[in-house]
Image (spheres, rainbow, N blue to C red):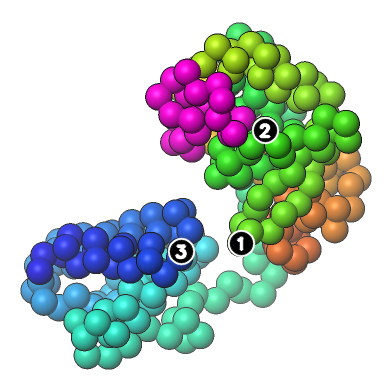
Amino acid sequence: MTDEQVVMNFKQWLIEDGKADATVKSYVNDVRKFNEYLNEREVAKEEMINRFYFTSYIKHLKAQEVAVNTINKKITSLKVYNDWLFRTLLVKDVYISIKRDKVKVANGSEDEVSVLNEEEVERFLFHMEKESQRKRVMGYMLLYTGLRVSELVNVRLEDIDNLTSTLRVNGKGGKIREVPLRSDVKEVIQQYIKGERAEGVFSNSRYLLISQRAEQLHRDTVRKWLDEVGKHLQFHIHPHMLRHTFCTRLLKNGVEMATVAKLAGHSSVNTTMKHYINISSVEKKNAVDLL
């Protein structure tokens, strides 16, 4: 079997095991990157993984100054892959231990998130005025609800409660949360539903965001659009950056951490604190400049 055949068999197992689409994509991509590393070093095809290859790869990632969280994500992916290879008798042992191998973050280390500053938010909103109704919905909902892009494309018409001005969100792990909708967000949604969407081929779809080719918008469409917007506005922008901006702006306006955690759909307040307690490197620099 070739590397790719093994990877495709692993992917099929992940799908049959009920893993989320995003998880499957992440695991498979991480395994392919690991295989590329081995191929560049002319490792024999039958040597899919062992302790030496794994630890060498992690050292390589550290030397490349890859973020600790990214390295740990790859370790998790390779651990699942190693377990599967062992169960299918493709390797002789399990060489990875999450407890032993995950990179420790030094006590007191900070996570920093990339966010839009207020000027960039304003420029983004001004740009939205020039966009189509569907793209305005995409932009407003990401900025003012903090949805993950996967949650955005899965919003159904029935999830929007106009009477209470709330949005029912199907989050990670099947967790349900409610997010209030600002009046301007409700307005752009209703304009789209009554306008562009009503004229679309898939106007009978249960999903809010549709395209000319499918009854549900693909998340890559959202990412590509934001990439184009960023190039036009001359600053980097992506869906999760708008989510970070949503959470950060709430905290800056005095909203309690627990409330932000609930709105963001975090499993615990600790997750919110980890990502947003330090806000951003730009905010910290601006604070010091005031001294």
SS category of the residue bearing label 2 = helix
| Nearer to us in this view, 37 or 3 | 3
Measure the C-alpha gap from mark 2 to mark 3: 26 Å
Total labels drawn: 3
Q: Which residue is mark 1?
A: 173
Q: Which mark is residue 19?
A: 3
Residue 74: which quarter of the image?
bottom left
Q: Position of residue 175 (x, y in %)?
A: 69, 59
User: Which SS type dominates the magenta stretch?
Assistant: loop
Look at 66% across and 42% down and name the residue there.
147
Earlier sequence position, callout 1 versus callout 3: 3
Earlier sequence position, callout 2 versus callout 1: 2
SS category of the residue bearing label 3 = loop
Q: Is residue 139 above or below residue 126?
A: below
| Nearer to us in this view, 271 or 139 | 139
Earlier sequence position, callout 2 versus callout 3: 3
Magenta residues (range): 201-224
Q: In the rendered view of the protein, which quadrant contains the N terminus?
A: bottom left
Q: Amino acid at mark 1?
A: Gly
Q: Is residue 104 above or below residue 22?
A: below
Proximity of marks 2 and 1: CB atoms separated by less than 8 Å: no
| Nearer to us in this view, 199 or 7 | 199
Residue 185: which quarter of the image?
top right
- Reply yes or no: does residue 122 show up in magenta: no
